[in-house]
Amino acid sequence: MTLPTPRFARRRRAMLLALLAPMVAKASSAMPANKRCALTFDDGPHPVQTARVLDKLVAHGGVPATFFIWAERIGPATEPVLARIRAEGHELANHSWAHANMAQLTREQIRSDFERAQAAITRAAGGQAPRFFRAPFLAASDALHELVPLPFVGGIAAYDWPGTDAPTARTRADKILRAPQLRDGAILVLHDVQPEPHPTPEALDFLIPELREQGFDFVTLSQLFERRGVKPQAGERRQWVVAE
């Protein structure tokens, strides 16, 4: 048997590449452009429930997220899970000190609650001050927007709290996946802490792969706004749902 010469082999390879080039180009053009979204979690930290969410994010390849901290829950029991949040590359944001309806508070109560939370979360984050605020229950007011010196963030909710029509992991994921606002720049609202049973960690097993199939990458909130070229400002009378 006669082996092909190196020159013949190179020629044959060039011919094959020329034949395949149109197909490769067509396949590449059919691939969706990468979109970005930010997973956010409210009401932690909790030494067990927050850890379940972190485990899922690791299991899906180290997905980054932003945790809106209920600062009254910071303490010796939750310091290890807060350290883990930082070590695994996630962002901490402000979800108030006492998780009261701040739209019903006096101006002095608003200042006191926010400043106490901001100081506690900054310490928990190793000196990095939170850049975003989410009002408890998404209940905002003119006074709240005036007195809290951070952009307000809402988002597309998984409805993963008691009394909603999303009691299972599948239905919670679907609340986001079927939302009309789901597009490039979307902010997703879930909870790492809620009363048991709390299948939000399992909802991530549906949500993360299906968002990836739709062409989404995951980033923290700071990364989302920066990469979208959007600069949210304190004092704006809005709660961001999509960074656009």
Image (cartoon, rainbow, N blue to C red):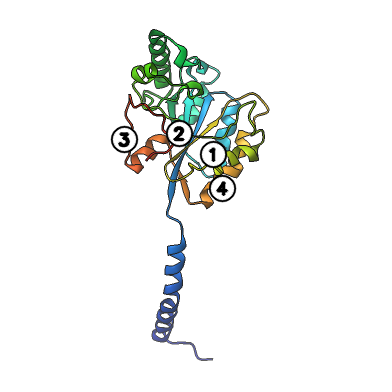
Q: Residues within 10 Å of mark 4 (few under 14, many from 20)?
A: few
Whole-number angstrom distance, CA of label 1 to CA of label 3? 27 Å
**Which numbered circle lies on residue 57?**
1
Q: In this rendering, is residue 146 above or below 27?
A: above
Q: Sequence-wise, which precedes: disc 1 or disc 3?
A: 1
Crowd band around label 1 with a 10 angstrom C-alpha radius: few (<14), some (14–19), many (20+) = some
Tag 2: amino acid: His
User: How many neighbours does mark 2 have within 10 angstroms: few (below 14), some (14-19), or many (20 or more)?
Assistant: many
Q: Which residue is mark 4?
A: 209
Position of 214 with respect to 128 (left or right) is right
Looking at the image, residue 63 lies above or below residue 110: below
> Residue 195: x, y in percent?
64, 23
**Residue 50 percent across, percent down from the top left:** 56, 28
Task: Tell me the residue that label 3 is attached to.
Answer: 231
The numbered mark, 4 or 2, whose residue comes first in the sequence reads 2
Provide the residue designation for mark 2. 90
The quarter of the rendered structure image containing the C terminus is: top left
